[in-house]
Amino acid sequence: MIKKIILILTLSIVMFGTLFADTTSPNLQIVQSNVNPDPVKPGNDLTIDLNILNIGDEISKEVSINIDSNNIFFLKDNYLSNNLKSICSGCSYDATYYFSVKKNVTSGIYPITFYIKHDKNQISTQVINVKVEGIPDLIISKDNLENKKLFPTEEFNLELELKNVGTSDAKNIKISSNLNSIIKIGSDSTYIKELKLNDKTKVITKFKIDENLNPGLYEIPFTINFEDDFGNKHTKVINIGVEILNKAQLDIQYLKLNTYTVNIFKNIEIDGMIENVGYGEAKNIYVEANVDLEGFKKSFIGTLKKDEDSPIQFKFKANTIGKHEIKLITHYTDDFGEHTFSENLEINVTKPTSQLYLILGILGIIIIIGLSKIIINKKKKNQ
């Protein structure tokens, strides 16, 4: 109804103007009746309805319409209620034009100019301004967490590539994240002044994983607030997936060696305690001794949960004189794979002392005396 009223008023103004104009010839005018949608988004379709009027007092002949759409609007089709080759005086005809709007065009107001050629190259023009209003669309096109394994208490840098794949520049961008178990370190929000259409930028934020977070798959939510070219506000939430795994950490709490200097042929004993000071379960635990002495060289433990401990024990025979390095290598597995670490000890195996030689000499004499008595007794029996 409102459009009809506007059309009637427009026609009245045009007809009133003819009272002061030369009415002895054709006079063609184009009156805009409808633009739909208004505004129109880039990549969408647009319809423009027009009225073509002859307000002169003579018939207009050889009528044709040309369009200049500035490479922003592409004409798809048109409908004319009359073939327009001629328009009688006082007559009015409807015309509808169907356009598609160029993709990725920057938001703004763009003209479509209609040229009416008639009656031996007379030309009338009508400019219709169309408002193109795009919407920014921000996505996270890349991140550095793909195939990355994280663990409780870990601090890590999250690198995001933010890209504008919408139909308008994005302005006053604010990126924030709020998750109790994966905590953002530093400022609560990151600000970007502008991200133009099809542009991208790198955003680096630092996070820390809560020590009590159970292993599993989690999502870090990012809330992105931004504005388009016309100041309209938009909000988007994007989630980034992250995998939290068990990470064990074994530590030898103490090692006790019964002696660091030992005489040859004596025993060497090592006692110790190993503890899981990490946050995940350690499995397939064993400690092996790399040493050139004879003895028990492996201590099997099995599994240790968080804060659990277990004793380890080794026993060797000091059968070679000199300094000997004992390398204790700990093996275990967790969700991150196999791990090893080592501890080194050193002992010195020495020759017997003079007191030991005396004891050995006495033992030798006793053995000789014993053997002599046996030989003498055998001789007496033979006599």
Image (cartoon, rainbow, N blue to C red):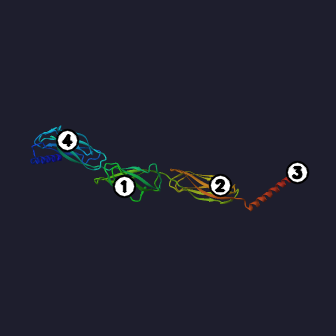
What amino acid is found at the position of numbered circle 3 in the picture? Lys
Counting residues from the start of the chain, the first of labels 4 and 3 encountered is 4
The answer to which quarter of the image holds residue 345 is bottom right
Say whether marks 2 and 4 touch (CB < 8 Å): no
Q: Which of 281 and 337 is in front in this view?
A: 337
- Which element type, helix, strand or loop, lies under badge 1? strand
CA separation in Å, label 1 and label 4 = 50 Å
Q: Which dot marks residue 315?
A: 2
Q: What residue type is labelled 4?
A: Ile
Closer to the N terminus: mark 2 or mark 3?
Answer: 2
Residue labelled with disc 4: 65
Q: Which of marks 2 and 1 is nearer the N terminus?
A: 1
Mark nearest the camera among 2 and 4 is 4
Pick whichever, 332 or 71, lies toward us.
71
Earlier in the chain: of badge 1 and badge 3, it is 1
Where does residue 60 sit, x and y in percent of width and height?
13, 40
Q: Give the farthest residue toward the bottom.
A: 355
Q: Which of marks 4 and 3 is in front?
A: 4
Disc 3: which residue: 381
Does 229 sit left or right of 153 as displayed? Answer: left
Measured in 3D between alpha carbons, the distance from the residue under mark 2 to the one under mark 1, in whole angstroms, is 61 Å
**Badge 2 or badge 4: first in the primary sequence:** 4
Comparing 297 with 111, the one in front is: 111
Q: Name the residue under label 1.
A: 175
Between discs 1 and 4, the one toward the N terminus: 4
Tell me whether the residue at label 1 lies in contact with that at label 3, contact meaning CB atoms closer than 8 angstroms: no
